[in-house]
Image: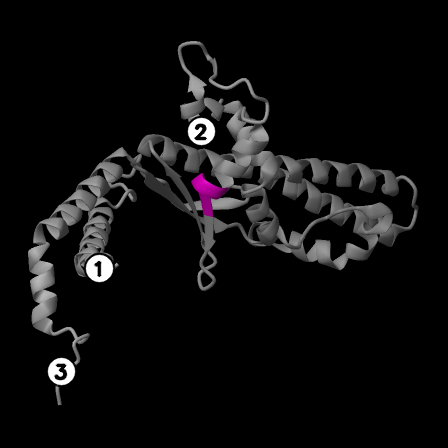
Amino acid sequence: MENDPEEISLRDLFDALWSRRLLIIALTLGFGIAAAVVSLLLPEKYEASVVLSPVDEESGSKLGGAGALLSQFGGLASLGGLNLGGSGKKSVAIATLQSHALTEAFIHDNQLLPVLYADDWDADKKTWTTTDPKETPTLWKAERTFAKKVRSLAEDKKTGLITLTITWTDPELAAKWAGELVQRANEVLRAKAIAESQANLSYLNEQLTKTSVVELQRSIYSLIEAEIKKVMIANGSDEYAFRVVDPARVPEQRVSPKRLLIIAVGVFAGLILGLVLALALPRLSGTRGHR
């Protein structure tokens, strides 16, 4: 059987590639160099992580019998909408740690808008480079940027431990921000718990003056004692909602950009493009010659 004139042998492929080897080499080197330049221009980023252990529900282990009292007299406490807590503290703590309010307050108090949007900030003039209100950074925009690109939260379902990770170009700032966010969450939740307990105490003392039933008075006194213990624990605990198991350290190794990987991808892309062009050019030339 005669060979099909359209059939291309391995020898033909090799000859086509070899004849255009300079093109293949040029594209491979060109893409590789371009990828290397891009990888050098990309900002280096570091990750600082702090491992946290959420405090037991309402610190039941510290309260001892107080937790049982709160459950026992929960019906009485519910009168008038009295809130004695006792449920969902872990979920509330995690939600607070990554809440809009806490993040915006953190950005505002530390004046991080010029830091987060350094490319849009004129350090000499102390003003934004753009005057367009739609383009000017705001706390709302900064909070969304921080949540998407800077802060991440992960929970280990087996151990219950929470890992807060900050990714930023400055390793020292990354470690500092991670620690401060945890501290702020603890302070916010502790202040909220104290305020709730004080409101509960006011309500219980008011109810105490309205009843002469001895058993009911005893129940109220027990609840008052439990609330006082909660206030004492909150006032005496810096790590109210989260205990730091492993504090954030200043990272020494960047997580991005992965320069070798970027260069390898660039070299591979250039090589593939060179091979495709080397094989396609003879066909294109032949097609034009027949016209």
Q: Residue type at mark 3? A: Asn
The answer to whether the residues at label 1 and label 3 have Cβ atoms under 8 Å apart is: no
Q: Distance between the residues labelled 2 and 3?
A: 67 Å
Q: Position of residue 32 (x, y in %)?
A: 18, 45
Lower position in the chain sequence, tag 2 or tag 1: 2
Amino acid on which the number 1 mark rests in the picture: Ala
Q: Name the residue under label 1.
A: 280
Which residue is rendered at x = 86% and y = 38% of the image? 206
Identify the image quadrant of the C terminus. Answer: bottom left
Q: Which colour scheme is used?
A: one colour
**Residue that label 3 marks:** 3
Is 211 placed left or right of 228 in the picture? right
Near mark 3 (Cα within 10 A), the count class, few <14, some 14-19 or many ≥20, is: few
Q: Disc 2 versus disc 1: distance between alpha carbons?
A: 47 Å
- What is the span of residues highlighted in magenta in the rendered image? 148-152
**On the picture, is 61 further left or further right than 277?**
right
- Residue 25 image position (x, y, % from top left): 11, 50
State how far apart marks 1 and 3 are (Cα): 22 Å
**Label 2 sits on residue:** 116
Left or right side of 47 for 278? left
Q: Residues within 10 Å of mark 1 (few under 14, many from 20)?
A: few
Assign a secondary structure to mark 1.
Answer: helix
The tag on residue 4 is none
Circle 2: residue type: Leu
Q: Is mark 3 on a helix, strand or loop?
A: loop
Q: Is residue 197 left or right of residue 141?
A: right
Residue 150 on the magenta span: yes
| Residue 187 makes an appearance in the image | no
Q: Does the magenta stretch include residue 67?
A: no
